[in-house]
Amino acid sequence: MFKSFQKTGNPRGHNNNALLYKHVIFMNEQKTILVTGATGYVGGRLIPRLVELDYSVRAIGRSTAKLKSRPWSRNDHVEILQGDMLDLDFLKQAAMGCRAAYYLVHSMGAKNKNFEVLDRQAANNMARAASEAGLEKIIYLGGLGDDRLGPLSRHLKSRLETAKILQSGKTPVTVLRAAQIVGSGSASFEILRYIMDRLPVLFTPKWVETPCQPIAIRNVLHYLIGCLESDKATGQTFDIGGPDILSYRELMNIYAEEAGLRKRLIIPIPFMAPVISAYWIHIISPLPSAIAMPLIEGLKNPVVCKDTRIREIIPQRLLSCRIAIRLALERIQQELVETRWSDAGLVMPPEWTYSGDAEYAGGTILECCYKVRLKASPEEVWKPVSRIGGETGYYFGNVLWRIRGSWDRLSGGIGLRRGRRHPSELYVGDALDFWRVLEVSPNLRLLLHAEMQLPGDALLEFRINPVSKNETELQILSRFLPTGLWGITYWYILYPFHHWLFGGMLRHIAKAINKQITHGPVSFMSSNENQIK
């Protein structure tokens, strides 16, 4: 459970936080800090900073493989626990022996339409577990919003309800209420980036004039860490925001200037419904409508800090919206995005992947497999495989991949727009276009699970097998568990294209690394290799 770690002087993206948070003093013999939502956008950035400051961290999530794939998981002071926030017994055990907990969980996702119910249960479990474990405090990152100014959106209402539930327990709760978080990879920033980059003319609802007070992700992290040691912050509720209060129109104009875009024409339409905005964002951005909808609904509510006491308790330099946007764009251009909104979510191989035969109890597993032998080492073959998708594409038939992505997007799926977090680096749980990474074994294997709209369930696997000292075999295996007659029909309609596509991919991968093909590409039956190991 504990892993070794070679610490570098300045891990990528950490921005010398040891200096930034030099007021925090922590000795290793003190109790562990529990971090929920460890692989989410904020949690994935918070943990390495806590580790950098010599905190012992217990990170919990629903997938051990996903947690262990993060670089920070190899630190001696990081403990990994797999479990679900909806499991009270697990949460009680996870909290035992901890000093404090960060509550960074949110159930809003593409598959959780009733996220409020899940948020409610998870918060109740956290409050009970913290009380029984005797935690000193819970630090919760919630959302800004004042229900006295009008009805709140489902998203903001759930954030406020979560805070009240946590506060109902015996453990003191520090609540940080934030508006939009500006940082590379955040959901709100990705919406802003895509609509501004792609649309020279924007027709918007009247919320475009709503005031907001965004905050940079690095300022959020500073507050989160500062609240851990500040007695003055314990049990308090604070509004956190940057120095700028502006309308969404002004925020859009600032982005356009920082991104070097021509000024966008923004036309408010009073009768434009949020659902139209959400589906429009679904079409042009990576965010699915199920996530975009609650966020868009929240834009009607003013989100401005009313209480700025935290600026005196935990002082720091607050970044303006312009600087925060500039830094986020720089991170994207430098390919140094630490975490993304799409990192969150369950990584669980489908049950049928463990079957030993093509005849599975739940149905017939259909497959198309191709292989090629190259005069290359496994390391050389792995390089193009690890870069697949995103800006690199799929080496062959990219027009067809884009058509499939557009079809998926129009039918309510996620399409290709999520891209990749990094051009060559992959973690378990990463979003990769319309795939989710299930397993990464460098120089050996890459396993992807389809998250596109399909009449069934699909896997795409790359296997690298050394044949001799100077020869390596690369295999592509596509497996599909159809749902009903339409699923079977879908597979056989595309089956001829799969043969053409996979053979072409293997030839072009060989071309990409300039290595000679010694045999193939040829199709094969996986037979006794049929089990996903």
Image (tube, helix red, strand yellow):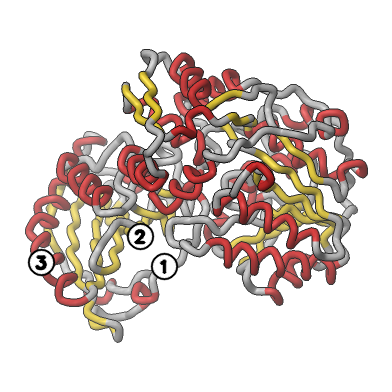
Q: Residues within 10 Å of mark 1 (few under 14, many from 20)?
A: some
The answer to whether residue 400 is left or right of residue 162 is: left
Q: Which residue type does callout 1 highlight? A: Pro
Per the image, label 2 sits on a secondary structure element best described as strand
Q: Which residue type does callout 3 highlight? A: Tyr
Front-most of 81 and 279? 279
Reading the chain from its start, which is encountered first: label 1 or label 2?
1
Rendered-image quadrant of the C terminus = bottom left
The quarter of the displayed image where residue 416 is located = top left
Query: Where 224 sits versus 486, above or below?
Result: above
Q: Position of residue 531 (x, y in %)?
A: 33, 74
Residue located beneath label 3 in the image: 492
Reading the chain from its start, which is encountered first: label 3 or label 2?
2
The quarter of the displayed image where residue 226 is located = top right
Q: Which residue type does callout 2 highlight? A: His
Residue extending furthest right? 231
Tags 1 and 2 in contact by the CB under 8 Å rule? yes
- Image point (15%, 66%), residue name: 491
Query: Where 312 sits versus 273, above or below?
Result: above
Residue extending furthest bottom? 361
Front-most of 111 and 305? 305
Q: Position of residue 439 (x, y in %)?
A: 43, 58
Query: Which label is found at residue 98?
Result: none
Residue located beneath label 2 in the image: 449
Q: Position of residue 198 (x, y in %)?
A: 32, 28
Front-most of 139 and 343? 139
Disc 1 and disc 2: Cα gap in Å?
Answer: 8 Å
Residue located beneath label 1 in the image: 349
Reading the chain from its start, which is encountered first: label 1 or label 3?
1
- Image point (31%, 53%), residue name: 413
- Image point (72%, 35%), residue name: 240
